[in-house]
Image (cartoon, rainbow, N blue to C red):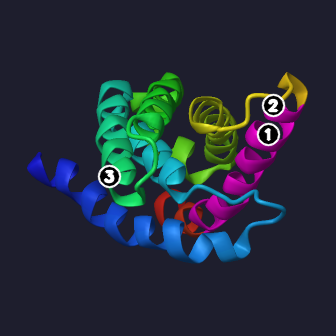
């Protein structure tokens, strides 16, 4: 049982380095994917809503401390992400939810909400209108994050369902 709590943190460490160092190189007009949201969604769909909410809180706090940004912004957005992804958890369909297009839908929805909340909290711009905030800070990063989650669906579908 302890391994279920240590494993995501061990996966988080290289993902955080990639998130903070490499992914800004792949940003398109300031929009970049969020690999930590993919990690939170994956483990939430595997272990449930309470687990995902707590995992989002812990990983958000760690990323806030590592990134040097506003403390609590990633923590809040990732906690809500884990809570939201938990609504798609079903004990009878764990392999199906992680290995099919359902995972991409969950990741895109959670990515949209997470990016929107993070930008809403930590944005220094006070003159953003709500439409640009929803589109540029919510929908586009969420879809870009879902694109990066595509290999998980492709490779896990052959292993877990076949």
Give the numbered dot on residue 134.
2
Question: Which mark sits nearer the N-terminus, 2 or 1?
Answer: 2
**Mark closer to the observer (3, 1):** 3
Q: Nearer the viewer, residue 104 or 56?
A: 56
Residue at mark 3 to residue at mark 1: CA–CA distance: 26 Å
- Answer with left or right where residue 141 lies relative to residue 45: right
- Number of labelled discs? 3
**Residue 66 placed where, x, y %?**
35, 59
Q: Height in image: 155 above or below 131?
A: below
Q: Which residue is mark 3?
A: 65
Badge 3 marks a residue whose secondary structure is helix
- Answer with left or right where residue 125 lies relative to residue 68: right
Q: Which residue is mark 1?
A: 139
Badge 1 marks a residue whose secondary structure is helix
Q: Height in image: 120 above or below 40?
A: above
For the magenta stretch, what is the residue range? 132-154
Disc 2 + disc 1, Cβ < 8 Å: yes
**Residue 6 placed where, x, y %?**
18, 55
**Residue 102 placed where, x, y %?**
65, 41
Residue drawn where x is 57% and y is 63% of the image: 152
Q: Is residue 92 magenta?
A: no
Badge 2 marks a residue whose secondary structure is helix
Question: Which mark sits nearer the N-terminus, 2 or 3?
Answer: 3
Q: Nearer the viewer, residue 76 or 38?
A: 76
Residue drawn where x is 32% and y is 52% of the image: 65
Q: Nearer the viewer, residue 144 or 32?
A: 32
Task: Assign the C terminus to one quadrant of the image.
Answer: bottom right
Residue drawn where x is 47% and y is 60% of the image: 160
């Amino acid at each position: 049982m302890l391994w279920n709590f240590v494993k995501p943190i061990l996966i988080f460490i290289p993902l955080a380095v990639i998130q903070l160092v490499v992914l800004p190189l792949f940003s398109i007009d300031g929009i970049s994917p969020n690999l930590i949201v993919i990690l939170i969604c994956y483990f939430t769909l595997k272990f449930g809503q309470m687990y995902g909410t707590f995992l989002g809180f812990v990983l958000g706090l760690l990323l806030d401390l590592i990134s040097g940004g506003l403390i609590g912004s990633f923590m809040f957005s990732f906690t809500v992400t884990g809570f939201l992804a938990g609504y798609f958890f079903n004990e009878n369909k764990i392999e199906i939810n992680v290995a099919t297009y359902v995972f991409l839908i969950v990741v895109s929805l959670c990515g949209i909400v997470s990016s929107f909340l993070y930008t809403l909290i930590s944005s220094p711009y006070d003159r953003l209108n709500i439409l640009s905030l929803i589109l540029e800070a919510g929908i586009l990063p969420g879809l870009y994050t879902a694109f990066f989650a595509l290999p998980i669906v492709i490779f896990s579908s052959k292993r877990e369902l076949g």
